[in-house]
Image: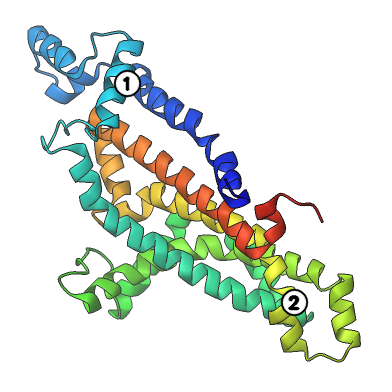
Amino acid sequence: MNIRAKNFLRRAWPAIPVLLLVPLAATALTDLMPGDPAAAILGDRARPQDIAAVDQQLGLDRPLPARYFDWLGHALSGDLGRSIGSRVPVWQEISQRLPVTAQLAVMALVFAVVVAFLLSIYSASHPGPIDRIATGTSAGLMSVPPFVVAIALSYLATTTGALPPLGWVPLSRDAYENLRHALVPALVLAIAEIPVFHRLLRADIVATLQENFILNARARGLPRRYIMFRHALRPSLFSVLTVAGISFGRLLGGTVIVETIFSLPGLGALAAQSIYSKDIPTIQGIVVFVAALYLVINLLVDLAFGILDPRVATGSRA
């Protein structure tokens, strides 16, 4: 087994206990919910025998360990159960909603990284008024709640008529209209990520520019742009790469507010609807799916460190 394979296994095995504990926590959510989920599903006029039948159907009359191992056994075979409301398999519900959330997350991450990348390079290499303005603006944006930005951009899109403020058009139906409908929600998500990326990358670039190998490159008379892109930028990407992976996982599982405001049929809206309707199988499936996806993304980020710095892949020290 080569060094890269050993490094992969060393980083991957801690995810196994997490993948086993997350379904346990998702199963225990039914016990932590206020009221009786069966009564909430059937309504106020439900008869006791009907409530008991739904409890038996959902397995709520069984102890937590039995429900956990039963759900885990079905999940390992690819069966996440059926939605109580639509009677559609949970995996099908997730697969139908995931493209919307994934597109928003990718667009938001690309916007945030590109803007933060350009601002950080300019700010770190040109300290002065523009750097102070960019840093102050980033600090201000970090304190603005996403729903405030969403309402402001939605109002702006409505008054100008340049972009549709609500709704969604699938990419397979009309690519142009899809981008028009996705632009404003993606910008809302990106605005929340830009300050974090900008502050991290700027600080890392400034610290890297003080290293001896950068001073040596300057002493040799190398152009400033060459030093920045060839020597300074690559070792400054570790923090941003880590945060980008975490942000992408958070965007996939945390777009509830944006999808609700803009009426988007994404995974966040499905989670909100499932919680409101006490759709237990769907809630369990979404929680476990997002957690597994989050772990996979972070594992890929760890492996990407080996590409940026071979010492990470081989386990050697500087």
Residue sitting nearer the eye, 68 or 206: 68
What crowding class fits label 2: few (fewer than 14 Cα within 10 Å), some (14-19), or many (20 or more)? Answer: some
Please give the name of the residue rendered at 38% of the width and 42% of the height, measured from the top-left corner: 290
* Residue annotated with mark 2: 231
Please give the name of the residue rendered at 41% of the width and 40% of the height, measured from the top-left corner: 292
Measured along the vertical axis of the image, is residue 134 above or below residue 27? below
The local secondary structure at tag 2 comes to: helix
Please give the name of the residue rendered at 45% of the width and 25% of the height, measured from the top-left corner: 21
Q: CA distance from mark 1 to mark 2?
A: 53 Å
What crowding class fits label 1: few (fewer than 14 Cα within 10 Å), some (14-19), or many (20 or more)? Answer: many
Measured along the vertical axis of the image, is residue 89 above or below residue 190? above
Q: Is residue 264 left or right of residue 154?
A: left
Q: How many marks?
A: 2
> Of discs 1 and 2, which sits in the foreground?
2
Measured along the vertical axis of the image, is residue 203 above or below residue 317? below
Q: Position of residue 78 (x, y in %)?
A: 24, 35
Tell me, yes or no, if residue 100 can be seen here: yes
Tell me the amino acid under the disc marked 2. Answer: His
Quarter occupied by the N terminus: top right
Tell me, yes or no, if residue 261 can be seen here: no
Q: Position of residue 177 (x, y in %)?
A: 22, 75
Which disc is residue 30 wearing? 1
Q: Position of residue 76 (x, y in %)?
A: 30, 30
Tell me the amino acid under the disc marked 1. Answer: Thr
The local secondary structure at tag 1 comes to: helix
